[in-house]
Amino acid sequence: MSGGDKYVYQSGFGNHFASEALPGALPVGQNSPQVCPYGLYAEQLSGTAFTVARHANQRTWFYRIHPSVVHRPFAPYNQDGHGIIGTFDARTTEPTPTQIRWLPFAIPEDQQVDFVDGLRTIGGAGDTALKNGLAVHIYAATTSMNQRAFSNSDGDLLIVPQQGRLDITTEFGPLMVAPNEIAVVQRGIRFSVALPDGPSRGYVLEVFDGHFELPDLGPIGANGLANPRDFQTPTAKYEHTNDKWSIINKYQGELFIAIQEHSPYDVVAWHGNYAPYKYDLANFVVVNSVSFDHIDPSIFTVLTCKSAHPGTAVADFVIFPPRFEVQQHTFRPPYFHRNCMSEFMGLIRGEYEAKKGGFLPGGASLHSMMTPHGPDAHTVEHATTRDLMPGRVADNTQSFMFESMFQLRLTKWATDNKQRDHDYFKAWQSIPITFNPSQR
């Protein structure tokens, strides 16, 4: 429990957790007894195929008041259109190699918009039906989800609040997620989002295949980066009501709605290793060069969703946290770069060290595969003339990156958004020529 967070959590990453809201609600010695304690129903939630290798197999057993199958048929939701897509082709999106930056995405404060209705897809790659690819979304919400729960059949969601805390109720129990924290809610888990601080905005990374895991540390050793003990998973808490609830399901990029006459959060106990979690980015143990030059930004990876190609990610979640910089005779800002990966960046708070002033909290940028990018002209001038004394960088700042092996296509909502900064290219135009063939 932390400041402003009234909930109790279990600690660890990928553990086999067990939690019960009533003593003895978990069966002893088996998963599915003929009659469960307290007259509950046993239900398994599978996050991987049954026959996946044991070390990678993920599933949870719920013990709940109603089986989740007790609902009316699904019907299309919001037939006038919503802001989410699940297939990224020429019909729905367009490609561009141009460097793109968005000013802070608008929050519709004159409307009643909850987390689901406030989701907008920026771009992505692949197809949810083929379980191949990813999507990047933003959310901008003004009201809590009331008697509504959301479930995503298409993939896992990594949620990055930028403005306002998210009070997330899940089948496993509640999570309070503040800016500078993240939450991961995996495929199929039902959850609702309340807004204790009023209007809220943030970013969402969705992966269609696999699950997020901690990156391998290699020669770093056993400790560093995001340590497993700092991840927090909810404890069981149940509701027993006969209220009317709407279950909104994202399936193949479309939204569907079903009605039921009870709370989806009637899980009295559960055990397993397929469970949502949150993480405080302030707990990240930074690794960096203490002599000269840069270590590549992969050293800032918090979580990765691996692809079939070793060392290459469907998506990495990378942060650029407060830290010391001490490199000698080195160009200290992030270097100029053309990357075989796509880079989507967001800013939670503060000023990003390579582009102070134009890159703002609640905004974003996209540098597509092999598109040149790097620090702006002002940053270059300062970095090449400053005294290289040991110092701090990124204090009171938190920027992050969704990095992917896929080439991202953008939605029309993103390309035509009024917050798009069409002058972004000017950030580099005044970088001076300093070449002198007569002076080495």
Image: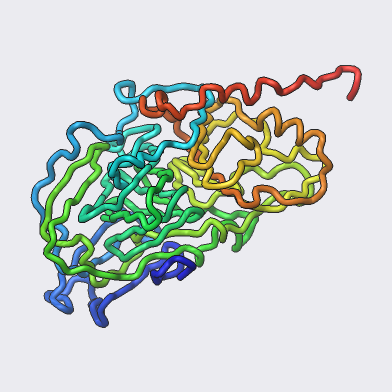
Q: Is residue 74 above or below residue 337?
A: below
Residue situated furthest left in the rendering: 72
Residue 388: name its quadrant.
Answer: top right
Residue 4: name its quadrant.
Answer: bottom left
In the picture, the quarter occupied by the N terminus is bottom left
Horizontal side, residue 74 vs residue 425: left or right: left
Residue situated furthest right in the rendering: 438
Q: Nearer the viewer, residue 39 or 214?
A: 39
Residue 66: name its quadrant.
Answer: bottom left
Q: Is residue 312 visible?
A: no
In the picture, the quarter occupied by the C terminus is top right
Q: Residue at 40% of width from left, 71% of height from top? A: 8
Residue 207, horizontal then vertical, whole percent: 38, 43
Residue 82, horizontal then vertical, whole percent: 26, 35
Residue 57, horizontal then vertical, whole percent: 35, 58
Residue situated furthest front in the rendering: 110
Q: Is residue 317 visible?
A: yes
Q: Residue at 61% of width from left, 35% of height from top? A: 357
Q: Is residue 403 above or below residue 169?
A: above
Q: Nearer the viewer, residue 309 or 346?
A: 346
